[in-house]
Image (cartoon, rainbow, N blue to C red):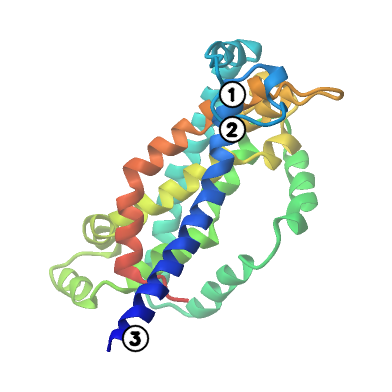
Amino acid sequence: MQSQRKKTILSKTLIHFVLMLVSASMIFPFLWMISTSLKTLDQVFSIPPKIIPEEPQWHNYIDSWNALPFTNAYINSFKIAIIAVLGQIITCSMAAYALAKINFKGKSIIFMAFIATMMIPGQVTMIPQFILFKYLGWIDTHLPLTVPWVLFSAFGVFLLRQFIMSLPNDLDEAAIIDGANHFIIYTRIILPLIMPSLATLGIFTFMASWNNFLAPLIYLNTPEKYTVPLLLAQFKGIYITDWTLLMAAATTAIIPILIVYLFGQKYIIESIALTGIKA
């Protein structure tokens, strides 16, 4: 009995030790980013390295903000992210309701087609999308960064469909007996019940849109239309990179994501706990 207890304590100690190592490896890049943002350029690669600078250079944050037009970039990023979030919540919830609660011919085939698109790498569709958007005259506009998010998201449809399918059919049947049609059931019964999943989808969409770097790099040419990730890349020069200003700007850029995540993390946990996200 005592031997078994020692094995249990040893096992838990090893698990906690591994978890602490993994946590430290994930936190260290953030600490290095914040530390570098408070150093001078000469201290960035000093040997031995120091995590806590002796004289924090707080003016790096002001200098980084004034070095490039970040005010305009933040406005662009917020606009694109909000449109993407609202669009996905509306279109994905409607598609998910149809695939979960309405019986029509070919429903299973359509859903499998949705799932299949999740397996296609983005690099495969990059060139056809660019040709299409160029034909439509959308190059150097924000339309390629918002319209695809609004019109289609296989992950969003899958996530919300799994949640809606977990709701009892008795709710729909009772509403139909009372004379409700599908629009009333969707707006007055389903949407209020899937708020945790809608919030989860909104958080994931906001984070993905805010951090999106490749699409703005491909489609935007005018500096006034740049987003925050694209503007951060401007600190990287051909011969030298100002790491202190870059890290200061990067630290500022993650604040909106941290705020969104801290306010919405309970919905992510609640959504996963309720749905189980079944494959």
Q: Is residue 81 above or below residue 148?
A: above
**Label 2 residue SS:** helix
- How many residues crowd around disc 1 within 10 Å: few (fewer than 14), some, or many (20 or more)? many
Residue placed most toward the observer, 179 or 46: 46
The quarter of the picture where residue 209 lies is top right
**Label 3 residue SS:** helix
User: Where is mark 2, residue-wise?
Assistant: 33
Q: Is residue 14 left or right of residue 114?
A: left
Looking at the rendered structure, the kind of residue marked 1 is: Ser
Q: Is residue 137 visible?
A: no
- How many residues crowd around disc 2 within 10 Å: few (fewer than 14), some, or many (20 or more)? some
Q: Quadrant of the N terminus?
A: bottom left
* CB-based contact (under 8 Å), mark 1 and mark 3: no
Looking at the rendered structure, the kind of residue marked 2 is: Met
Q: Is residue 135 above or below residue 2?
A: above
Looking at the rendered structure, the kind of residue marked 3 is: Ser
For marks 2 and 3, give the CA distance.
46 Å
Q: Residue 9: x percent and y percent?
A: 35, 73
* CB-based contact (under 8 Å), mark 2 and mark 3: no
What numbered label is drawn on residue 37? 1
Identity of the residue drawn at 35% across and 49% down: 265
Identity of the residue drawn at 29% across and 60% down: 270
* CB-based contact (under 8 Å), mark 1 and mark 2: yes
Identity of the residue drawn at 76% across and 24% down: 241
Q: Residue 206: x percent and y percent?
A: 48, 42
Q: Is residue 255 above or below residue 7?
A: above
The quarter of the picture where residue 197 lies is bottom left
Q: Is residue 153 above or below residue 217?
A: below
User: Where is mark 3, residue-wise?
Assistant: 3
Sequence-wise first label, 1 or 3: 3
Q: Is residue 134 visible?
A: yes
- Mark nearest the camera among 1 and 3 is 3
